Image (cartoon, rainbow, N blue to C red):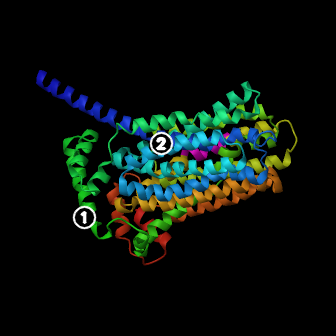
């Protein structure tokens, strides 16, 4: 009995070690997501102070450019970050991104005029875009198939946590300090997680899939043993190696590989998935939430405080998704539910802002409905889109496929960010929101027709499904045949 107990104890200790090791990897790497969230969220409150004549004196156009320069940089960073991570490794590029995060943040906080901050925000965007591609890929390649949903979704949790931190610091600094240059302090705080990310990546390993693909099989096995255990590690390594052998003719994927039908089809699906995440209007709330609340009737300080509620809801529902739904509910079901709820919420905001304009109750109704919008979107669409993008691309295509898809995601994000101030000035809050209601309906329809189901499929199984696809009818009907059996 004592021997059996000892064996159980040893087995339990090894299991705890594996979980702890995976948890350490996921926490450290997702500081890239935290920076992503903070740098996109901090502008929400900082813009109000930047626009003042004694600061950067922004108009509608430059306000949109300051917000969206980061997003345009992120689009380019997504493409090149994915390619560079394929060549030099996920871990190495994340260390470089941490350095870019640090110095670009310093540049933004010291900017004397709009031109300088637009340039620095663009450079910062290169790091944000790179992190948006590499961190989910890093997590997907580290996580076991049955826990991949919750592990990869930790990045989304860190993104919304970063945005919440930005809203909290914006509210605290904006209410405590009367200096209009307080926006500089709001921005510079992002240097802290950048330093943590750089030091943290010194102590985590490279992903087993990347190591195996680059001939470092023994290191891949060593890492897998720490993550899975002896038997599971050898089985997974064998599966990875078999998959690599099938892809040898592709070498390292290039744009020329888009001539291969199944790859082109897969990348086009990924592009669509990236675009629909943005056009439904999530970043209207995340970038311009304070502006929206001011237009609805709140004062500046009240809007900054109320915006914390939006950030808190985003964090809460992301945690619920991770803990309850991520490994249980079908990806497509979650997406369709999210788009339905968020689109109807935005439609209700549009109607009420038209009917109740100028009435005292309007700002309170708007903050409640924005929370409902965020509950639906951030509890479903936000994490699931990044999860699906991290799952659908095969190993040698992952950097290129994620890069291209995320490029279009960020371009769509850029378009939303740059045009919203103009839409708001021309059509008002109600008219601007109606446009996003229509786009949300389009996102729902695309999800229904084209987004594949990936729940409980290994990365290799997902690839095999696409490889064996034969185009006999339309793309949409074939996707349903493959993924909705």
Residue 328 can be seen, yes or no: no
SS at badge 1: helix
Q: What residue is rendered at 38% in x and 71% in y? A: 469
- 196 inside magenta stretch: no
Label placed on residue 80: none
Query: Farthest bottom residue?
Result: 472
Q: Nearer the viewer, mark 2 or mark 1?
A: 2
For the C terminus, the image quarter is bottom left
Q: What residue is rendered at 82% in x and 42% in y? A: 53
Query: Farthest top residue?
Result: 2
Question: 81 or 162: which is nearer to us?
Answer: 81
Instruction: Determine whether label 2 and label 1 are within 8 Å by CB.
Output: no
Label placed on residue 245: 1
Please state the horizontal and vertical placement of residue 58, each as a whole percent of the image. 77, 47
- Tell me the CA gap for discs 2 and 1: 34 Å
Above or below, 166 relative to 429 = above
**Dot 2, how many residues are within 10 Å of its Cα: few (below 14), some (14-19), or many (20+)?**
many
Q: What residue is rendered at 23% in x and 43% in y? A: 222
For the N terminus, the image quarter is top left
Above or below, 459 relative to 308 = below
Read off the magenta span. Answer: 371-379
């Amino acid at each position: 009995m004592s021997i059996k107990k000892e064996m159980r104890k040893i087995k339990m200790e090894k299991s705890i070690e594996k979980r702890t090791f995976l948890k350490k990897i996921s926490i450290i790497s997702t500081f890239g997501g935290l920076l992503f969230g903070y740098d996109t969220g901090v502008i929400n409150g900082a813009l109000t102070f930047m626009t003042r004549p004694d600061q950067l004196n922004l108009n509608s156009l430059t306000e949109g450019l300051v917000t969206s320069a980061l997003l345009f940089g992120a689009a380019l960073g997504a493409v090149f970050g994915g390619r560079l991570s394929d060549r030099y490794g996920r871990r190495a590029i994340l260390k470089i991104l941490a350095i870019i995060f640090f110095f670009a943040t310093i540049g933004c906080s010291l900017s004397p005029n709009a031109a300088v901050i637009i340039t620095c925000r663009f450079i910062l965007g290169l790091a944000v875009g790179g992190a948006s591609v590499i961190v989910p890929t890093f997590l997907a390649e580290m996580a076991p198939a049955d826990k991949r949903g919750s592990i990869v979704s930790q990045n989304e949790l860190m993104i919304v946590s970063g945005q919440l931190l930005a809203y909290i610091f914006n509210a605290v600094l904006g209410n405590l300090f009367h200096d209009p240059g307080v926006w500089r302090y709001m921005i510079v705080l992002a240097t802290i997680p950048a330093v943590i990310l750089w030091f943290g990546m010194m102590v985590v390993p490279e992903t087993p899939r990347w190591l195996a693909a680059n001939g470092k099989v023994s290191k891949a096995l060593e890492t897998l043993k720490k993550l899975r255990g002896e038997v599971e590690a050898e089985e997974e390594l064998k599966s990875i190696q078999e998959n690599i052998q099938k892809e040898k003719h592709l070498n390292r994927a290039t744009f020329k590989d888009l001539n291969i039908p199944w790859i082109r089809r897969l990348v086009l699906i990924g592009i669509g998935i990236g675009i629909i995440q943005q056009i439904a209007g999530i970043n209207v709330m995340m970038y311009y939430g304070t502006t929206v609340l001011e237009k609805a009737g709140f004062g500046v300080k009240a809007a900054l405080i109320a915006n914390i509620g939006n950030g808190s809801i985003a964090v809460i529902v992301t945690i619920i998704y991770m803990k309850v739904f991520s490994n249980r509910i079908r990806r497509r079901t979650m997406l369709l539910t999210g788009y339905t709820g968020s689109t109807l919420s935005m439609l209700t905001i549009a109607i009420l802002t038209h009917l109740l304009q100028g009435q005292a109750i309007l700002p309170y109704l708007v903050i409640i409905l924005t929370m409902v919008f965020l509950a639906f979107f951030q509890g479903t669409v936000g994490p699931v889109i990044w999860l699906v993008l991290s799952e659908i691309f095969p190993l040698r295509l992952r950097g290129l496929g994620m890069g291209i898809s995320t490029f279009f995601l960020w371009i769509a994000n850029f378009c939303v960010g740059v045009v919203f101030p103009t839409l708001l000035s021309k059509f008002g809050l109600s008219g601007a929101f109606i446009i996003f209601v229509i786009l949300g309906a389009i996102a729902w329809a695309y999800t229904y027709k084209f987004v594949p189901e990936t729940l409980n499929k290994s990365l290799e199984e997902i690839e095999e499904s696409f490889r064996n696809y034969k185009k006999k009818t339309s793309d949409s009907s074939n996707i349903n045949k493959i993924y909705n059996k």
